[in-house]
Image (cartoon, rainbow, N blue to C red):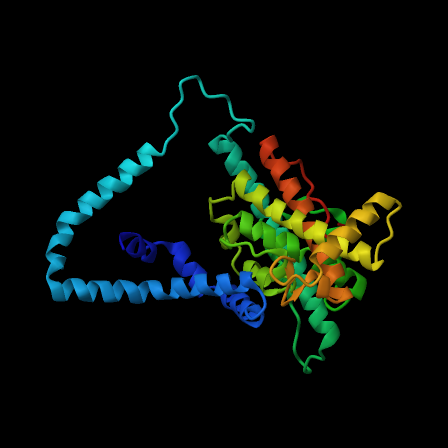
Amino acid sequence: MFSLFRLLFKSPYWRMLLRRATWLEASLSFKRAHKDNRARKHLLGLFFLLLVPFLCIVYLAWLARSGAWLLVPFLLPILWWRARSAKRDDAPVHIAPTPEPVTKDLTDEERAALRRYLAELTLIHAVMVDRAGSERFLKEKELPEGIEVTSRRTHLDLLKAMDLWERLAREDREAIMMPDGHWEWPRINQVALGMERLRLLRWILRIDFYLPLVGQQLKGDFTVAHELVKEPQKVLGGNKMADLAMMQTGKEAAEHYFQRCLAEAISRGYYAPDDAEMVERARKLSASLAGRQSDDLVLGSALVSEASKDHLMWATSLSYRRCSFLSWTISLLEAGEPPEPPFASVVEE
């Protein structure tokens, strides 16, 4: 019971319950619960999390009625001592000198420099994606007479205030300098693809504490960029950063999606690689998972084997982008120092 009470005082618990994506994922699991054992387990786990406050209240009420609450001041030190002892006992015992870690630990200065670089990169992506969102809006909507669009000026002022303007790639500076409403669709769509990098950067810098799987995050959201343009200190003011193990886990999950989606695309004939052996392996993998509701990966509310061509191709591209970017950030942490300016172009990526 003590562990349940501790859960109530942990911020990840409340973040998980209060984030909008938790309930979107729950709705997808609810749609699949009648045929997918994984969806039922997900809903059961969420139901248990919702029960925690209720169980704690019931337990406290029982303590009050029974008089056992008088023992609480004596029990708390014992529970604290037991938890501390268990943590100490779990530490491994070495009879020989421990080997040096494969990846060197970053110094405080190296870590701060890398985080600063990633924070500035995040802000650049936020500006560019926010501009793409503004340009898309201007293409699709007709503004009332007298309304002035100020996205260009806002973004230009922000980049100069943060001392980023001169470190932008030439292509990005030229794109920002264009008058509002003058981006064409190819440029809008290309820059909007930077949304995946932005989502990963937000997670790496712990602005967002949770990174959904590719299949749970197929849709883009321009608000992730606009929020940071309005409040840049959300990026620049923090000091937390995901570690290598977290990035590696995210990369492996993305690779799993990429391999599965690529195999499905090849088996359907959307890709035609020259390697006949690769084609045969892809077909066997797709055939072994086709229609298996509790085994195949899910894209939204459908299995990969059931997904439409557009969803499948988009998920393949998205997972590949995630793998590539996380591979780059992992190599960045392993190197221990940020690249030299200018920043790589968002427009030309």
107 to 176, vertically: above or below = above
On the rendered structure, is 233 left or right of 133? left
Which one is in front, 208 or 136? 208
Which one is in front, 78 or 123? 78
Do we see residue 281 in this rendering? yes
Do we see residue 156 in this rendering? no
Q: Where does the N terminus fall, quadrant-wise? A: bottom left
Task: Please identify the residue farthest to the bottom as the structure is shown.
Answer: 145
Q: Quadrant of residue 134?
A: bottom right
Residue drawn 53% across the image and 55% down it: 232
Residue 143 drawn at (x, y percent):
69, 79
Which one is in front, 64 or 23? 64
On the rendered structure, is 345 left or right of 48? right
Task: Please identify the residue farthest to the top as the structure is shown.
Answer: 96
On the rendered structure, is 237 left or right of 83? right
Residue 21 drawn at (x, y percent):
53, 64
Residue 209 drawn at (x, y percent):
49, 53
